[in-house]
Amino acid sequence: MGGKHKPCPNCGKELEFSAKHNALFCRHCESQQTIIRTSDFSAENSDYLQTLSELDEQAEVPEYIVANCENCGAEQQFPENVTADRCQYCDSPIVAAEYSTRPLRPSAVLPFKITREDALQHFRQWLSSRWFLPSKIKKQARIDKFKGIYLPYWTYDCETSAPYTGQRGEYYYVTVSYTTTVNGKTVQRTRQERRTRWYPAAGMIKHHFINILVPANHSLPEKLVRELEPWGLAELGEYQPDLIRGNQEQSYAVPLAAGFSDAQRQIEPRVREFIRRDIGGDEQRIHTVNIINDNIEFKLILLPTWVNLFQFHNQQFIFLVNARTGEVQGERPWSAWKITFFTFFMLAIVAAIIVFFIH
Ligand SMILES: [Zn+2]
Ligand SMILES: [Zn+2]
């Protein structure tokens, strides 16, 4: 693979991938180098069951890679489940992916498209649209706070069939008579009431699920990461170390089979939705469903994220940018002082209104 070292042909410093230039770029002398990519690349799937039988699936054991920096020679241990990063001493890009102990390597990647400068802009906009944000937080909007991380994901495809039994409910209306009191007299009236008639229903759902996405490690809060979707997976390109250079690449920690269990949890509600549509009528009851997934295939892919981990009052907050679409998600601190001030301000207005109406 030869992914470790990539010196600038001009000055000898390490090249890194630049989203702005969509090429390898040298920070020192600003020279660029095109990355040659397969133009007709289409991300290929691997067979799930066959791979599982060949794999000795280890549990969620963290991976720690030790590598030497090609620029300064310093040996360093990468953080947990990280296979590419920058040297902690000289900041040179290091891709140590070939030292990974994980048996499966990513086959496809969406390269960074949103630049670090764009990420900062998105963060500033996000901050300015939040209410009750502590003023000091604006100081966290610094370009050097953003780290480019390639997050690993499993994607699964499968042909799903689901025989089911249930009931279709159809509404009908009946006229019901009742007595009521009008002007002190008891009178007979009628009204329409809705009833449901149930009919047996049974059938079979068939659906080809494509690219069911499962985060393959939990280095960032899943709730936030999920909200970054969709990614535009049709644009996936071939994995190349040159596309990673200068950003962090994380390895998977969720085993392949556990990832598929997650995919199945995503499939089930969608199958039930298909069944409801298939049953039709006004209401549906589902008694039995048997979901069968055949021809299961998977890919291991990398998706690009700008991450800003910022501290406030000894608490950590996370801000994320989908580095393809610019979609942002974040956790935020609240300013107790601003909330208190606002509450008193509102109470004062309410009090003024009451005083105004009483007099
Ligand atoms: Zn250079
Ligand atoms: Zn170094």
Image (cartoon, rainbow, N blue to C red):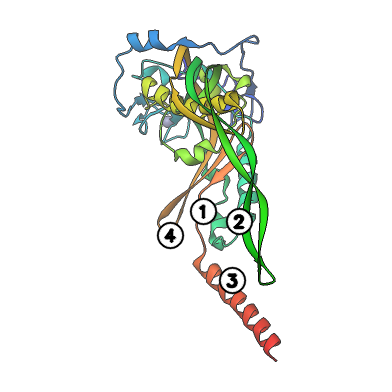
81 over 235 or under it: above or below: below
- Depth check, mark 3 against mark 4: the one in front is 3
Gap between marks 3 and 4 measured at Cα: 21 Å
Q: Earlier in the sequence, mark 1 or mark 3?
A: 1
What secondary structure is marked by label 1? loop
**Residue 205 location (% of width, % of height):** 54, 18
Residue at mark 1:
332
Between 31 and 232, the one lying in front of the other is 232
What secondary structure is marked by label 3? helix
Residue at mark 4:
313
221 over 293 or under it: above or below: below
Residue at mark 2:
130
Mark 3 Cβ inside 8 Å of ligand 2: no
For residue 72, which quarter of the picture?
A: top left
Looking at the image, can residue 245 be seen? no
**Residue 14 location (% of width, % of height):** 52, 25
Between 262 and 288, the one lying in front of the other is 288
Gap between marks 1 and 3 measured at Cα: 18 Å
**Kind of residue indicated by mark 4:** His
| Ligand 2, image quadrant it occupies | top left
Q: Earlier in the sequence, mark 2 or mark 3?
A: 2
Residue at mark 3:
342
- Residue sticking out furthest to the bottom: 359
Residue at (48, 18) in percent of width and height: 162
What secondary structure is marked by label 2? loop
